[in-house]
Amino acid sequence: MSAPRKLFVKTYGCQMNVYDSERMAEQLGGQGYVTTDTPEDADMILLNTCHIREKAAEKVYSELGRLRPLKDANPDLKIGVAGCVAQAEGEEIMRRAPVVDLVVGPQSYHRLPAMDDAVRSGQRALDTDFPDDDKFDTLKSRGKAKRAPSAFLTVQEGCDKFCAFCVVPYTRGAEVSRPASRVIQEARELVDAGVAELTLLGQNVNAYHGHDGGLAGLIWDLAEIDGLERIRFTTSHPNDMDDALIAAHGECAKLMPYLHLPVQSGSDRILKAMNRKHTAESYVRLIERIRAARPDILLSGDFIVGFPGETEEDFEATMDLIRTVNYGQAYSFKYSTRPGTPAAEKPQLPEDVMNDRLQRLQALLTEQQRAIQNSMVGREVGVLFEKKGRIGGQLIGKSDYLHAVYADAPQTAIGQVRRVRIETAGPNSLGGVLVD
Ligand code: SAH
Ligand code: SF4
Ligand code: F3S
């Protein structure tokens, strides 16, 4: 038998791309590929791209430029572009980058085996359809090889919300939910392979409707799986946080006390211009209800500064909202113009105004995150240990609240949720000792 072909995958963007990269590698596994960490010895290089902010496409073209010498050295090397830039600019990539053999969109990568056959026979292959058939029906099952304790599982894709700044509804298409039975089957396969924590993924995961009881119904069913210790989900939209999901945060022991609930802005004027369809007030009320169900929940958010038309007063409203909510984690971005989105037509704010606001916003968010991390000291938390640390007998894991935690622990603790008393808090991680 010939030596296996080697596949190098580079992943940009969100967790859904991380999940897709794994599944693409599994698809190509059936074509005789094994994954490699070094592009130099690869027979196929796949860039799984993100289109969310400006210059994303330009980054892909410069990465392709850097890969060209590898192709000159190895004429059998095939190069593919997947993900959201592939979806948005497929034909343009083919035109501009002759080095590319294959372009595949996020909804058509189940066709990769046939595309691989085509490129191996010297053709170029492009598939950016939103096919009628469900790619998940065709994808290979997850396999039995031992896995890391924490895994992603995509349950919903696409977005119908059309926020005025965002490309996702165009690159990922309309909202589609996978049937609960399929999700549960995949979850069982993952748990059988050693997974103890699942993070359910969707561009709008709480709009999930593949179960009669919505996302909460799915979570309750998954919680029945023996060996599955923890469930998380991301990313949610405030308007889809229904009562059952809020209640689950209080009642389902396996659902972790962490919620990423982006708000983008604290100004009603800007929220309206963004087409978010909620107000700052309704968001704060929602947070109150969630905290009533689960008082210790750690909240995370996304913020955009410098959306077209944002005044200093609007920005201050965002700062006020942050002070009201108190976030344990956050992601913040300068507004980035995305051609084809409604906001792209509007006059842009000067760069220095955006820079200044981003700095002030991030300083406040960092202060809140640090204070919450420091408040963990002295507390006992559950930690799922994931791997060895750099020092001696240390393992690294994630707390219930998703903080990285270091502790001295036996190797056998990898894959287990153990009780840890937190003793130190650094900027990016906590340190503790095992108490069970
Ligand atoms: N579906 C999720 C997030 C998708 S994109 C949600 O609704 O929240 C992740 C984050 O990127 C967004 O929450 C937003 O904060 C940021 N983002 C999206 N488009 C952007 C743009 N044009 N400029 C700057 N940030 C953007
Ligand atoms: Fe983009 Fe808005 Fe959809 Fe989130 S909800 S993916 S920000 S359009
Ligand atoms: Fe980026 Fe596409 Fe995810 S644009 S953030 S990779 S959905």
Image: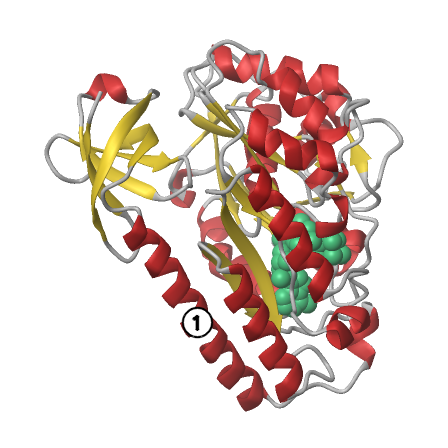
Q: Nearer the viewer, residue 246 or 149?
A: 246
Classify residue 161 as left or right of residue 79: right
Residue at the far front: name it: 292
Determine if residue 295 is in view. Answer: yes
Quarter of the image for residue 301 reads bottom right
Please determine whether, in this image, residue 237 is positioned above or below residue 274. above
Amino acid type, residue under disc 1 in the picture: Leu
Image quadrant, ligand 2: bottom right
Quadrant holding the C terminus: top left
Please determine whether, in this image, residue 230 is positioned above or below residue 332. above
Count the marks: 1
Q: Position of residue 178 (x, y in %)?
A: 76, 26
Residue at the far left: name it: 392
Q: Residue at x 51, y 77 (%)?
A: 358
Q: Position of residue 398 (x, y in %)?
A: 36, 36
Q: Position of residue 203 (x, y in %)?
A: 69, 45
Q: Residue at x 51, y 24 (%)?
A: 254
Determine if residue 153 is in view. Answer: no
Q: How is the image coloured?
A: secondary structure
Residue that badge 1 annotates: 364
Classify residue 380 as left or right of residue 139: left
Q: Nearer the viewer, residue 348 or 205?
A: 205
Q: Nearer the viewer, residue 7 or 424?
A: 424
